[in-house]
Image (cartoon, rainbow, N blue to C red):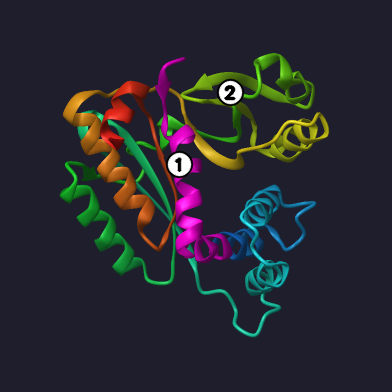
Amino acid sequence: MSGHSKWASIKHKKAATDARRGQLFTKLARAITVAAREGGGDPDSNFTLAAAVQKARDFSMPKDSIQRAIDRGTGAGADAATIDRVLYEGYGPAGVAVLVEALTDNRNRTSADMRHAFDKHGGSLGEPGSVAWVFEKRGVVMVDAGRYSEDDLIPAIDAGAQDVSEEGDSLKVVSAAEDLGAVRDALERAGVDIESAELTMEPRNVVEVTGTDARAVMRLMEALDDHDDVEAVHANFDIPVDVLEEIAA
């Protein structure tokens, strides 16, 4: 929906700030390690690992660091992986559904931190299964809507993309999770610069949020996303761009 922005079109811009702080490299390494442990160390046969490695490359993570993270996941490294993937589900202000993917070596600590973040920012941590049904795993590629039109993204459709839509100042290309690499490659071969490409949990429905609820939702999302153990945060809010600009001012 033009004139609106969902979390998918906000968080990739925020990631650049995280990278400058150095925080992102730790999260990227953990994601690679867990993906390698869960699906094997070959990106050609493990699309989750392929997406994690590509994201690390996008942020100029050194090749040696990427390989060490893979080795930890497969047990080939000096220190075997002890990191677990944990999913937290809850509700934010205005009934927004929130799904948090965490990678942690201490479940009790992370669970307590997640509960505190939800409580502090007007939300509530839910039971397993309470909001997971709202989301489905998809590949999402973001490109600059100021430079490209939907016509420029036809190669993505030919490569398996299922939908192209405008969100804020970006165009969002959605594909099946396993087609993310092919869609990205097709766009790059067509000369389209990629803002971000990642596996994410896309909401099946959205909740429009405005006013003070929008501010509260953004505070919750940023608190969760900034946590060292959090790999990704997914939510089904939809905030008008003018409201986001007012919040950022």
Magenta-colored span: 1-30
Q: Quadrant of residue 3?
A: top left
185 to 232, vertically: above or below: above
Q: Give how far across and how far down residue 205 sits, in percent.
A: 41, 22
Q: Residue furthest right?
A: 189
Q: Tag 2 or tag 1, which sits nearer the N-term? A: 1
Q: Does residue 240 appear in the picture of this structure?
A: no
Say what amino acid the circle numbered 2 marks: Gly
The residue identified by callout 2 is 146
Report, in whole angstroms, how far the alpha carbon at label 1 lies from the one at label 2.
18 Å
Seen as rendered, the residue at the extreme bottom is 78
Q: Position of residue 64 (x, y in %)?
A: 71, 72
Secondary structure under the numbered disc 1 in the rendered image: helix
Q: Residue at x 17, y 49 (%)?
A: 119
Of residue 50 and residue 173, the one placed in the foreground of this image is 173
Q: Is residue 64 left or right of residue 28?
A: right
Query: What label sits on residue 11 in the rendered view?
Result: 1
Between 30 and 151, which is closer to the camera in this rendering? 151
> Where does the C terminus fall, quadrant-wise?
top left
Q: Secondary structure at mark 2?
A: loop
Residue situated in front as seen by the camera: 65 or 106: 65
Which secondary structure dominates the residues rendered in magenta? helix
Q: Position of residue 225 (x, y in %)?
A: 38, 51
Which amino acid type corresponds to the residue marked 1 in the rendered image? Lys
Q: Is residue 94 left or right of residue 53?
A: left
Neighbours of disc 1 within 10 Å: few (<14), some (14-19), many (20+):
some
The crowd level at tag 2 (other Cα within 10 Å; few <14, some 14-19, many 20+) is: few
